[in-house]
Image: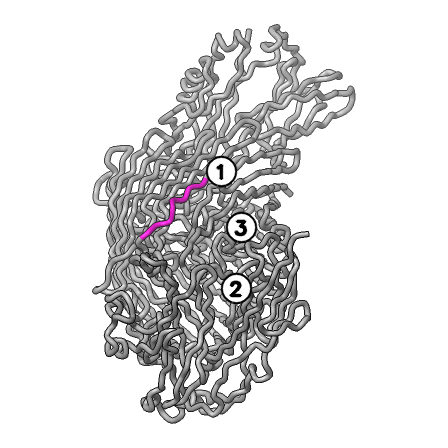
């Protein structure tokens, strides 16, 4: 009779930890200390019709398991039909697991499970094979043995079933993947290795009398997806809107170079950045109003040369949290959004080398752990560009040389043992250079001060650590100090030089008290201190801005000095869950004191109260809202006074509010809608009354407002499909002075639509596509220039109000295809990423001719194919 | 992005060096750097390859009182439709100083022009702003479209400098090393590259002194630059910074006209200007 051989797949690791109903996007998950294990596997009867037709199939299931290990929900993600689905669901409902655990004990999880129906050889042959009894195996010598090893990772696989069907014998692999048979008769035997989630391996082996035959069985995982965090985990979040994307999704999104930071540009609230750069324009805020952190460390430059890739290797990134607004008091000094990249906190027991190469750069990362219990996790990565070698092929040989170069490195240590003191260390740095050589004798315009070569270089280095500890059930603390250095240099010809070296020390510390799940109080300190040496050499004295006479003799100017400043921002947050069901209502009230001191120059003090609430309505819906103040200190250059008097500018202020809801639609799809309004005050603008050295170049006279609605419908990476459709309807306006008209923010985009999808095909192929449509940026029209005879250029007249017109809309389609090749001891991922695959000609800004009587558009990225590969080698 | 930026060009747009409409290319005053009380006369290089030039109206105003676009001239002044119909007193009040070619512009620097400055500041001086409108001829019965009027402004340095500026001048053109007399016409092949050189007069690059804000007197030498213009063809570069005084001229493969003009304007960065025109004739195709 046909027997059903059932295989089940537990993909990599648990997909997600789930409470009764997964409804909200995840924030960073505490790592599981123990995966769920299948204790009672229930064999489903082979569907008779399928058996008669000799059909095989695999049903992908979503199984939710509660904290006791009981299956609470089984749903079909990818059906197989032919009666397989019903049989698999019925069987899976009877499974019993050991519960998953994290540091707090058993926790609920959701897992993806592939239930395979495979006909045995006899059934396939249509014949019944009689098993051959071989006596009492325990008394016979071992004469066939081996190990089961995962292809690509060389990982020994425990709990594998190794069968010799013809003899009806089987052996299960131990923790080291070892199996054995005793007393096999000499001759050829067919050995099969079976396990849920792996291709069944069938291999003939010859047993010779009097000898022990060894065989290594290489089996292929059916899914090598990175088990990144995903968003079906439901837990309270302190932030109203925190969107988390798994690394597996990030790698498959076209047009992002697999970069985790750039991906946030595809989420609601983020406007399209010009020229494909990585500039963050979040909820109508200027790029400099949003801050980016790596493990809580503030980073001034997050992209290589303004937009290619972020400065951290994706293989060392665990997650990226995108907070467009409504965040708590732990983040500050900004009126825009925040992006917080968290580096990897778990490292594999077996050492692993990964190498990636694309059109821009190549780099490697080494991951592994040491110690008797693998308690010391280490990752080291480095990367270098070579675009400067490729560029000449695309540029005319006209004597100009363009040499962009960058490199970066990261090193992370993570203690992942059982000691209650948890700590980690992270060091990273990068250096970017861009050099443009002008041919000798070539006039770059007519100004003698703009002649010659242009070179810029900037670099950042950071070293930081974290220490976490919990005392009992109530108290916990975290301290994260860091120290770093930023360098920037700019040379234009022989007369313009800027050199700055800045040292930054940061300390993030927080202590939390949690009382019976209902109340937690967290007090924190976000301290930043910096001191800088700078040299600025200009061909003119900036003080002369007050009286511009282009014919007057310019006096070279040098400003050389040091600057110090610090900001010890204390903050307090109280989280209260007033209802008995602590997951139903969460109220957060926080306050942050922003205090920035630049001795003898400026002192900025502001108090930022912030409130947020989440209310779970039923099991699948959440209503959420927030309101709060956010202050941002002036940029260093905005505080400069030529007369060295104290600065006259203070902090910019934003009062940001939001209201929205989240709705789960089945286990994989979530809908989120959020409206926001931001009132901006005291914005820093150019001083229109500047007339002498007694005046400040900048004043806090601007106002602004930004409002809109964000919608995202997201299919979690469950099953073969992931993706989202996000849409933002927004408007952002500015007013420089109270008596002036309001005008549109420079990057105001009324409609921002982004659709991203990835789909896993058989044979380890995957496809990704992205469609973007945004309203064109505002622009100010000009017409009819007047010729400045002395300077040989035309000065333009605006022919309309500031930003009163718009560029045509932007739209682009990007696509990506990946193919994973798995070999015995390594894996190779090859991909082709095509940016702007349909070659949409997208205007980025207007270009006028010399006298402003004609205009055309500076168009965005053309079609750019970007091939690459990633190599993964277990060591 | 870098690919885009380095490849950035404006080839779809008309170029500044290409003369295909009414343009003001240069304005020179004599003297180049007057003192209070001096009489200043004006000359301009105005080219109009398509429509004949009717003339140019000239105004002068205090540099400190000017806006970013030259003198503020009230348009109501011309409500009558022409300068002839404007009230002479109103014209004078607006700073009107002449109309080329009928009334050559001239201006006497007020004697008290620098009185508000300190003695040291008077050495560096101040400037007056000159504003001109070049007006094309209008066909009989037609009306003047204000977009067709070319507007320009120029600063007139006024100082008590010890080494007042003088206008630079072009002595001769050289085409592939061959000197061309001013006013002569040169015969060129079509579709060929020619080395052009504008040879400056010996006094064009002047030494001068400058008193810094710290009171230090420095001896300097002018760093003039040349701007090249043409009617047909193209240049390897449209500006040359002295001591480079050359460019490469690419004659057109199929010129629209048998002859064309090339111009070079030299600016000494202190307000002084000079210019020269080269007439070229393109050989007939073989």
**Mark 3 touches mark 2? (CB < 8 Å):** no
The residue pinned by badge 1 equals A838
Q: Residue at x 31, y 51 (%)?
A: A325
- Disc nearest the viewer among 1 and 3: 1
Count residues near mark 2 (Cα–Cα under 10 Å), then give few for <14, some for 14-19, many for 20+. Answer: many
Distance Cα–Cα, label 1 vs label 3: 29 Å
Does the magenta run of residues contain A841? no
Q: Which mark is residue A313?
A: 3
Dot 3 or dot 2: first in sequence order is 3
How packed is label 1: few (under 14 Cα within 10 Å), some, or many (20 or more)?
Answer: some
Disc with the residue nearer the chain's start (2 vs 1): 2
Q: Nearer the viewer, mark 2 or mark 1?
A: 1
Secondary structure state at the residue bearing disc 3: loop
Determine the residue positioned at 45% across, 78% down. B28
Examine the residues drawn in magenta and state their main secondary structure.
strand
Label 1 is found on which chain of the structure?
Answer: A
- Tag on residue A458? 2
Q: Residues within 10 Å of mark 3 (few under 14, many from 20)?
A: many
Give the alpha-carbon distance from disc 3 to disc 2, as whole Å. Answer: 18 Å
Q: Which residues are magenta?
A: A805-812
Q: Which mark is residue A609?
A: none
Q: Is residue A765 visible?
A: yes
- The reply to whether the magenta stretch includes residue A809 is yes
Quadrant (top left, top right, bottom left, bottom right) of the N terminus of chain A: top right
x 55%, y 85%: residue: B206
Badge 2: chain ID: A
């Amino acid at each position: 009779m046909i027997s059903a051989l059932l295989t089940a797949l537990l993909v990599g690791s648990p997909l997600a930890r789930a409470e009764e109903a997964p409804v909200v996007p995840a924030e960073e998950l505490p790592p599981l200390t123990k995966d769920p294990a299948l204790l009672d596997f229930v064999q489903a009867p082979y569907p008779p019709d399928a058996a008669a037709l000799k059909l095989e199939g695999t049903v992908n299931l979503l199984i939710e398991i509660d904290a006791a290990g009981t299956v609470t929900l089984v749903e079909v993600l990818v059906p197989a039909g032919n009666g397989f689905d019903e049989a698999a669901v019925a069987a899976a409902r009877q499974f019993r697991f050991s519960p998953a655990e994290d540091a707090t004990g058993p926790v609920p999880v959701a897992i993806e499970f592939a239930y395979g129906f495979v006909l045995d050889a006899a059934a396939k042959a249509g014949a019944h094979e009689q098993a051959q009894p071989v006596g009492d195996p325990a008394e016979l010598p071992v004469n066939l043995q081996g190990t089961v090893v995962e292809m690509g990772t060389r990982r020994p696989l425990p709990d594998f079933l190794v069968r010799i069907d013809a003899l009806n014998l089987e052996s299960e692999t131990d923790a080291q993947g070892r199996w054995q048979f005793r007393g096999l008769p000499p001759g050829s035997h067919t050995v099969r290795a079976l396990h849920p989630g792996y291709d069944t391996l069938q291999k003939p082996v010859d047993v010779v009398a009097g000898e022990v035959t060894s065989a290594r069985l290489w089996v292929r995982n059916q899914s090598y997806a990175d088990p990144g965090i995903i968003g079906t985990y439901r837990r309270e979040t302190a932030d109203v809107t925190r969107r988390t994307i798994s690394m597996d999704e990030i790698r498959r999104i076209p047009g992002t170079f697999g970069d985790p930071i750039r991906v946030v540009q595809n989420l609601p609230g983020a406007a399209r950045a010009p020229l494909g750069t990585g500039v963050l324009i979040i909820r109508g805020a200027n790029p400099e109003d949003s801050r980016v952190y790596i493990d809580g460390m503030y980073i001034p430059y997050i992209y290589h040369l303004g937009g290619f890739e972020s400065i951290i290797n994706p293989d060392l990134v665990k997650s990226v949290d995108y907070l467009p607004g409504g965040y708590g008091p732990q983040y500050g000094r900004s009126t825009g959004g925040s992006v917080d990249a968290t580096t990897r906190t778990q490292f594999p027991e077996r050492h692993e080398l990964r190498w990636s190469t694309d059109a821009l750069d190549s780099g490697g990362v080494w991951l592994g752990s040491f110690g008797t219990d693998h308690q010391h996790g280490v990752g080291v990565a480095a990367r270098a560009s070579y675009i400067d070698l490729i560029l000449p092929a695309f540029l005319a040989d006209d004597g100009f040389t363009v040499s962009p170069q960058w490199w970066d490195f990261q090193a992370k240590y993570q203690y992942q043992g059982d000691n209650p003191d948890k700590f980690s260390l992270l060091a990273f740095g990068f250096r970017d250079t861009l050099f443009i050589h002008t041919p000798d004798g070539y006039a770059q315009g007519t100004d003698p001060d703009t002649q010659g070569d242009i070179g810029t270089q900037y670099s950042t280095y950071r070293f930081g650590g974290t220490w976490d500890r919990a005392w009992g059930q109530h108290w916990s603390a975290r301290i994260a100090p860091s120290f770093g250095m930023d360098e920037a240099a700019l040379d234009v010809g022989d007369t313009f030089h800027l050199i700055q070296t800045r040292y930054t020390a940061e300390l993030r510390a927080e202590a939390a008290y949690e009382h019976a799940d209902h109340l937690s109080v967290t007090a924190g300190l976000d301290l930043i201190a910096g001191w800088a040496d700078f040299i600025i050499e200009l061909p003119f004295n900036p003080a002369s801005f007050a009286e511009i006479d282009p014919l007057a003799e310019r006096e070279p100017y040098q400003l050389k000095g040091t600057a110090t400043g610090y900001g010890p921002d204390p903050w307090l947050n109280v989280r209260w869950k007033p209802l008995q069901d602590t997951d139903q209502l969460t109220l957060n009230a926080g306050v942050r004191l922003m205090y920035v001191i630049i001795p003898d120059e400026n002192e900025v003090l502001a108090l930022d109260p912030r409130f947020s609430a989440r209310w779970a309505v039923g099991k699948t819906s959440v209503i959420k809202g927030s309101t709060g103040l956010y202050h941002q200190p002036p940029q260093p250059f905005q505080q400069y006074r030529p007369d060295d008097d104290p600065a006259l500018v203070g902090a910019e202020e934003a009062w940001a509010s939001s209201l929205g809801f989240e709705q789960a639609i089945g286990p994989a799809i979530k809908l989120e809608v959020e409206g926001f309004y931001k009132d901006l005050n005291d914005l820093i603008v150019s001083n229109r009354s500047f007339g002498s050295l007694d005046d400040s170049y900048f004043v806090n006279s601007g106002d602004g407002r930004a409002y809109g609605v964000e919608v995202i419908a997201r299919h979690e990476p469950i099953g073969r499909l992931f993706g989202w459709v996000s849409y933002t309807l927004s408007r952002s306006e500015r007013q420089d002075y109270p008596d002036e008209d309001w005008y549109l923010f420079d990057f105001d985009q009324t409609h921002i639509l982004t659709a991203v999808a990835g789909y896993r095909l058989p044979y380890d192929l995957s496809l990704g596509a992205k469609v973007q449509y945004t309203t064109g940026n505002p622009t100010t029209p000009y017409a009819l220039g007047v010729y400045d005879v002395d300077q040989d250029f035309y000065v333009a007249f605006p022919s309309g109000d500031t930003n009163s017109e718009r560029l045509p809309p932007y739209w682009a389609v990007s696509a990506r295809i990946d193919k994973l090749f798995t070999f015995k001891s390594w894996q190779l991922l090859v991909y082709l990423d095509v940016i702007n695959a349909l070659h949409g000609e997208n205007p980025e800004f207007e270009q006028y001719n010399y006298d402003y009587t004609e205009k055309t558009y500076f168009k965005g990225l053309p079609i750019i194919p970007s091939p690459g590969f990633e190599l993964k080698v277990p060591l | 992005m870098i690919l885009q930026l380095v490849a950035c060009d404006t080839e779809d747009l008309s170029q500044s060096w290409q003369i295909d409409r009414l343009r003001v290319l240069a304005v020179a005053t004599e003297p180049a750097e007057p003192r209070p009380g001096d009489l200043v006369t004006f000359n301009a290089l105005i080219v109009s390859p398509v429509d004949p030039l009717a003339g140019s109206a000239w105004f002068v105003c205090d540099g400190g009182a000017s806006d970013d676009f030259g003198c503020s001239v009230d348009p109501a002044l011309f409500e009558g439709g022409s300068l002839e119909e404007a009230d002479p007193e109103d014209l004078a009040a607006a700073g009107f100083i002449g109309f080329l070619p009928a009334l050559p512009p001239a201006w006497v620097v007020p004697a008290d022009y620098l009185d508000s400055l300190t003695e040291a500041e008077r050495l560096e001086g101040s400037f007056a702003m000159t504003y001109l409108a070049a007006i094309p001829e209008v066909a009989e019965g037609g009306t003047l479209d204000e977009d067709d009027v070319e507007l320009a402004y120029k600063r007139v340095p006024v100082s008590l400098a010890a080494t007042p500026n003088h206008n630079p001048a072009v002595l001769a053109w050289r085409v592939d090393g061959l000197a061309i007399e001013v006013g002569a016409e040169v015969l060129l092949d079509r579709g060929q590259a020619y080395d052009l050189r504008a040879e400056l007069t010996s006094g064009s690059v002047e030494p001068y002194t400058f008193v810094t804000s710290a009171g230090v007197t420095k001896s300097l030498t002018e760093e003039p630059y040349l701007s090249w213009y043409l009617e047909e063809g193209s240049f390897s570069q449209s500006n040359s910074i002295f001591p480079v005084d050359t460019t490469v001229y690419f004659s057109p493969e199929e010129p629209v006209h048998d002859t064309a003009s090339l111009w070079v304007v030299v600016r000494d960065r202190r307000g002084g200007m000079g210019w020269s025109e080269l007439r070229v004739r393109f050989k007939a195709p073989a």
